[in-house]
């Protein structure tokens, strides 16, 4: 496929997804395993927010691509990779924080030259699947838990971080097969409500969220519309924009 044909394909797909995402919601284009040229084309078509799953791939693309891009890290966050991530000047958000150790490492390694705090979403495992990362959700009436403790740590001990909300990877089966909506999305909303109350009660006067509320990031290519309907503020769409991905093994075999 020629460069012009690929651009036309990307523009068509991006426009289609944008038309289905309301203006006040944020679309993160997930560019994992896709070439920097694809990201550049989408950026030139007006897309600012991009998501990556792997630290090295994010670092490499950030060096090559325009500094105006807002990068979101959406992969498993290991504290030993925090220094590398913290050094990326246009890293906008980490959506997968799950520990005080990683939060502390990020806060410690963010350079003083950075003028704004790094946005943070805490990942919640709403489906209970062992293969997915995330802290347990909160239930109504819960006053403390791993989630509240991490939120408190970020807000009170990490001045270079800004707690913005919660993220989950819900069960795709729930989205595709449930006529009543995805229960995992509803679980994240309920968890958000409990955590917001905790923040208002216990962290009064501190800086967290956006205008007194926590944002929700839920929904991917196959279920982002269901997530938006459920109230998501952020959706993460990859294949819907860039098309199918080769596996890591296939990519390695081409080198």
Image: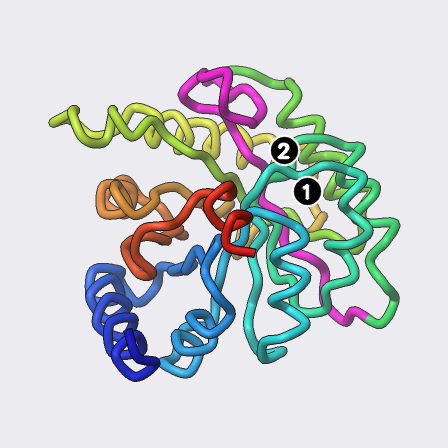
Residue 204 — which label? 1
The quarter of the displayed image where residue 58 is located? bottom right
Foreground residue among 119 and 140: 119
Residue identified by numbered label 2: 201
Q: Residue at x 21, y 72 (%)?
A: 12
Mark 2: few, some, or many residues within 10 Å (few <14, many ≥20)? few
- The image shows residue 216 at horizontal and vertical percentages of 44, 44
Could you tell me which secondary element the residue under label 1 belongs to?
loop
Which element type, helix, strand or loop, lies under badge 2? helix
Q: Residues within 10 Å of mark 1 (few under 14, many from 20)?
A: few
- Residue 81: quarter of image: top right
Q: In the displayed structure, does residue 173 sit left or right of residue 121? A: left
User: Magenta part mainly helix, strand or loop?
Assistant: loop
Residue bounds of the magenta highlight: 114-140
User: From this viewpoint, which residue is outermost toward the left?
Assistant: 179
* Residue 208 seen by the camera: no
**Residue 160 versus residue 169 in the image, above or below:** below
Residues at marks 1 and 2 touching, judged by CB atoms closer than 8 Å: yes
Residue 13 drawn in magenta:
no
In this rendering, is residue 104 above or below 114? above
Residue at (25% x, 25% y) in the render? 173
- Residue at 53%, 36% (x, y): give it: 196
């Amino acid at each position: 496929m020629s460069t012009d044909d690929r651009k036309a394909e990307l523009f068509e797909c991006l426009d289609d997804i944008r038309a289905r995402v309301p203006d006040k919601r944020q679309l993160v284009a997930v560019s994992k395993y896709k070439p920097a040229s694809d990201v550049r084309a989408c950026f030139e078509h007006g897309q600012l927010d991009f998501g990556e799953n792997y630290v090295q791939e994010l670092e490499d693309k950030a060096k090559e691509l325009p500094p105006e891009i807002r990068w979101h890290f959406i992969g498993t966050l290991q504290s030993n990779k925090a220094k590398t991530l913290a050094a990326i000047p246009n890293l906008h958000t980490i959506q997968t924080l799950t520990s005080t150790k990683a939060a502390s490492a990020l806060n410690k390694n963010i350079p003083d030259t950075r003028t704004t705090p790094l946005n943070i979403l805490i990942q919640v495992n709403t489906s209970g699947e062992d293969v997915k990362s995330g802290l347990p959700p909160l239930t109504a009436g819960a006053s403390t838990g791993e989630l509240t403790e991490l939120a408190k740590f970020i807000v009170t001990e990490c001045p270079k971080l800004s707690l913005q909300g919660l993220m989950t990877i819900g069960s795709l089966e729930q989205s595709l097969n449930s006529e009543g909506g995805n229960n995992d999305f509803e679980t994240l909303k309920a968890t958000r409500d409990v955590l917001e109350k905790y923040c208002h009660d216990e962290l009064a006067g501190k800086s967290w969220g956006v205008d007194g509320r926590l944002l929700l990031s839920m929904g991917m290519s196959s279920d982002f519309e269901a997530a938006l309907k459920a109230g998501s503020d952020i959706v993460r769409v990859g294949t819907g924009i860039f098309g199918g991905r080769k596996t890591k093994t296939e990519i390695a075999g081409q080198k």
